[in-house]
Image (tube, rainbow, N blue to C red):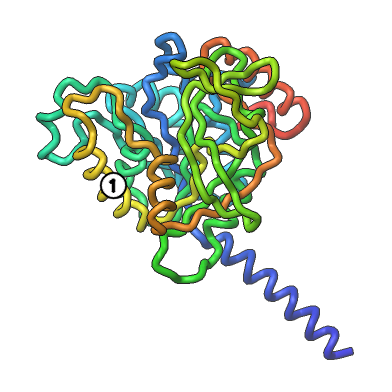
């Protein structure tokens, strides 16, 4: 009898310890919101209200992340958006969670490259966006897009994986929440997705950043100069939901210099993109990438015409009790 009671107490103590450790484990949510939103008809798509009380997609992302265990939010924005951004969401979120800002600017590149790309008009992509955070993030972190809704399960999976102790080795430990391509397409035009190959152990073996993927009558296809090329609509894809650790900044910094050295002078469109960066690290054996699965449906605002469907999706989630009528 005593043995059984002792075992029961011990199991309860172990569970409580695990929960306390989880509560103490710090993890940061990085939201990339510096995109110009050119495909959105000139508006700032990240700040478009979609909820019943004027909530934007980021509100729901932050709500889900906090519920999962994340205790800090870093917004990556452009300096010229700062006033509008803080008025719409920043000042409000600062009241419920620790907030920091990182600023992604075209000129934020190593000094020796500044003259070479003087005519550049847009930031350098998602890799540069994360690199901008190196002075404000010192804990495990999850990267997301500002204009994508990922669902609650994705944050729980990502947080639990980020805070667990991994085996020590020389490789960077990366995780990615994967989605099914067919569930991430827009009815209103082409999208860019990182198309993945995953092995039987749920480890990423390859990822290719692919632009102009369009929904078709038979599934999906990539629009190229030669015509439409079909792709498997069931392919796992990256939606830029990456679980990373502070040592990743060093790899980003090194890779950014190599990227800037390799592209054509005065390049106006070349971007330093996370899926390509991770693909290169995979190829040279520098990283292991665990692919986590979420069964929630993704939705997002790529084009202005997508907004009505997103508003309807949010309304359905609120009516279904997934979210309260007013979040914060």
Asked whether residue 67 is in view, the answer is yes
Instruction: Give the quadrant of residue 275.
Output: top left
| Count of numbered circles in the view | 1
Q: Position of residue 47 (x, y in %)?
A: 47, 21
Q: Nearer the viewer, residue 173 or 278?
A: 278
Q: Is residue 97 left or right of residue 187?
A: left
Q: Nearer the viewer, residue 159 or 179?
A: 179
Element on which disc 1 rests: helix
Graded by Cα atoms within 10 Å as few (under 14), some (14 to 19) or many (20 or more), the crowding at tag 1 reads: some
Q: Nearer the viewer, residue 1 or 119?
A: 119
Q: Which residue is mark 1?
A: 255
Which residue appears farthest toward the front when viewing the image?
226
Q: Position of residue 142 (x, y in %)?
A: 48, 47
Query: What residue is drawn where x is 38% and y is 55%?
Result: 284
Q: Is residue 317 left or right of residue 19?
A: right
Query: What residue is drawn where x is 61% and y is 53%?
Result: 199
Which residue appears farthest toward the bottom when viewing the image?
2
Q: Position of residue 116 (x, y in %)?
A: 12, 29
Position of the C terminus by quadrant? top right
Looking at the picture, does residue 139 appear above or below residue 197?
A: below
Query: What residue is drawn where x is 50% and y is 70%?
Result: 167
Q: Nearer the viewer, residue 258 or 226?
A: 226
Q: Position of residue 13 (x, y in %)?
A: 69, 75
């Amino acid at each position: 009898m005593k043995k059984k009671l002792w075992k029961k107490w011990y199991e309860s103590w172990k569970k409580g310890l695990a929960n306390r450790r989880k509560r103490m484990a710090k993890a940061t949510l990085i939201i990339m919101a510096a995109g110009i939103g050119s495909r959105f008809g000139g508006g700032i798509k990240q700040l478009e209200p979609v909820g019943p009380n004027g909530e934007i997609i980021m509100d729901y992302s932050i709500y889900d992340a906090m519920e999962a265990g994340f205790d800090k939010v870093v917004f990556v924005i452009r300096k010229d958006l700062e006033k509008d951004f803080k008025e719409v969401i920043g000042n409000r979120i600062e009241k419920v969670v620790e907030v920091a800002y990182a600023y992604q600017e075209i000129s934020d590149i190593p000094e020796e490259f500044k003259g070479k790309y003087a005519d550049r008009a847009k930031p350098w992509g998602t890799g540069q966006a994360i690199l901008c955070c190196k002075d404000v993030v010192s804990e495990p972190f999850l990267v997301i897009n500002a204009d994508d809704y990922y669902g609650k399960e994705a944050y729980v999976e990502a947080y639990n994986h980020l805070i667990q102790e991994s085996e020590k080795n020389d490789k960077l430990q990366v995780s990615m929440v994967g989605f099914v391509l067919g569930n991430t397409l827009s009815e209103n035009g082409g999208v860019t997705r990182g198309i993945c190959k995953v092995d039987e152990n749920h480890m990423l073996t390859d990822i290719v950043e692919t632009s102009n993927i369009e929904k078709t009558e038979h599934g999906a296809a990539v629009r190229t100069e030669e015509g439409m090329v079909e792709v498997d609509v069931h392919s796992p894809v990256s939606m830029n939901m990456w679980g990373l650790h502070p040592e990743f900044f060093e790899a980003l910094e090194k890779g950014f210099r190599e990227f800037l050295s390799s592209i054509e002078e005065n390049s106006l469109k070349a971007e330093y993109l996370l899926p390509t960066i991770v693909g290169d690290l995979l190829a040279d054996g520098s990283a292991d990438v665990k692919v986590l699965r979420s069964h929630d449906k993704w939705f997002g605002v790529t084009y202005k015409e997508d907004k009505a469907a997103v508003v309807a999706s949010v309304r359905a989630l609120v009516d279904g009790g997934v979210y309260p009528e007013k979040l914060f």
